Image: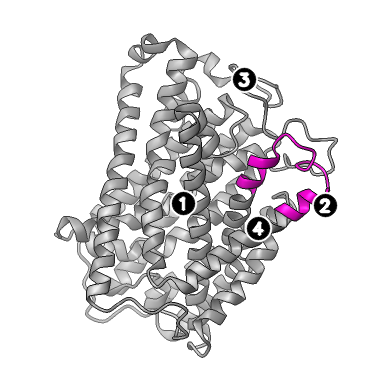
Amino acid sequence: MKEVFHSSVGQIDPSFEGTTEHDEAFVHGAGADVFGDDKNHQIQYRTLTWPLVAVLMITEIVTYGTLSLPSALAVVGIVPGVILIAFLGVFALYTSLVLIQFKLNHPDVHNMGDAGMILFGPIGREVLSFGTVLFAVFAVGGQLLAAQIALGALSDNKLCLMWYTGIFAIPTLLLSLPRTLNFSLSWMSVLAVISILISCVVAMAGAGKNPTPGRSVQVSVSSNFYTAFISITSPVFAYAGHFMFFPLVSEMRRPQDARKAAWALGSFSTLFYILFAVIMYVYIGDKVASPAFSSLPVKWQKAAYGLALPNLLEAVAGALYNHTAAKIIFIRFFRDSPHLHSHTMTGWFWWTFLVVLANGAAFVLAIGVPIFAYLIGIAAALFASWYTYGLAGAFWIHDTYVLKGGMRALRQRPLMFAINILTVLAGAFICVAGLYAIIKSIVVAYATNLVGTPFSCGVAA
């Protein structure tokens, strides 16, 4: 299977690989590498290896996506749920490989905004840059809410929920401050991944030791479109983090090794998602909550959340999103200036300001907007549907057309052309259907008085 993917994506023909060394100033006529050869600079960005990129991506995606998947199986049934998770895993692996190839062909691309400039011009750059920063900030807020739930469970909700959120906002801010990823985030992510894995193993053991009496486990479940799609947004967006590939690959010593990170991420996340979702659903049944840890007996629930605390307290995933939101704006303004690679007062002032601004915005949104969890869903539908799925098709079509000989090149590859047209259409469907489902959920939440008040000091959900 790996050979099929590599043949389809990385070796459309031998020349499509670009140069073997990403340090070349130009690849296929693209602009210069965003960081260039920074070995002699004070601040050296290109320090990551592919295993560290894989771990960073696992931290970002698996931490965020795992705990909601068992509840998706409870809505659609175990067989459709497993098929969906597996299919989306393969689909996400394919699109990640396409994104990486696009980055290798265009070394000046640092983020989705830069890619938008190549595909759609200045308007595309602004729209995709805005979407990336917005989604990253919302993801930080989502991590703060997850940490809030964990600390609330461990403390029996004895504190105001704003305190829980604030506690986790502090390490998120501090870990975001180093200008390069290798300083803290890349190595801390190793412990974070170990933490979430152990906590999930403990949760599965707790579910197996304490199965829910009279539970219902269905092979498949019939439901209407709205209910079904709300449930499948969990596996759809469990893979939503592909926009991080561009900035991470930009900071690799050997960007051409990024495919190895994509394979590691895709293989691990898909297998782990299926294992965790199936075990939790089988032993807890159709009443499994989201996050799944909250369905366990109190003792096991606290053990699972407690073991996940190193991941949450380190705030690695949240800090990575926060760091990325700030860096996109910082590079936009200082890409060709000495402030990017040197320790200048101006550079550090604006970097610190942007990090604090992104973190503060996420904190205020998390505690001040009662429907913030729904807004994360809207942002995911609007942007993650394209960043993870749809835009990959556009990237392949663009580069095949521009680099390989126009329409003739596309006609020579009818199968791949069709696959990538369908990829674009899949992104559009996820976007539209996701918006419909999330907006309807907001209407239902208000109609049933499930929406709280801003800056509430109640207990964590």
- Say above or below: 445 vs 109: below
Q: How many marks?
A: 4
Label 1 belongs to which residue? Answer: 269
Label 1 secondary element: helix
Q: Residues within 10 Å of mark 2 (few under 14, many from 20)?
A: few
Q: State the image coordinates of residue 8 (x, y, percent, origin top left).
A: 42, 24
Indicate which label's residue lies in the foreground, 4 or 2.
Answer: 2
* Front position in the image: 289 or 224: 224
Of the two numbered discs 1 and 2 in the rendering, the one whose residue sits closer to the viewer: 2
Q: Quadrant of the C terminus?
A: bottom left
Q: What element carries label 3?
A: loop
Of the residues shown, which amino acid type is indicated by label 1? Ser
Residue at 47% across, 60% down = 64
Q: Which of marks 3 and 2 is in front?
A: 2
Of pointers 3 and 1, the one earlier in the residue sequence: 3
Separation of residues labelled 3 and 4 (CA atoms):
32 Å
Which residue has dot 3 on it? 27
Sequence-first disc among 1 and 2: 1
Residue 341 percent coordinates (x, y): 79, 41
Q: Going from the N terminus, do you reach mark 3 or mark 4 first?
A: 3
Chain part drawn in magenta? 327-350
The colour scheme is one colour
- 393 within the magenta span: no
Vertical comparison of 29 with 121: above or below: above
Q: Is residue 355 left or right of residue 93?
A: right
The residue beneath circle 4 is 355
Side of 120 relative to 359 (left or right): left
Q: What residue type is labelled 3?
A: Val
Tag 2 residue: 345
**Residue 285 shows which numbered tag?**
none
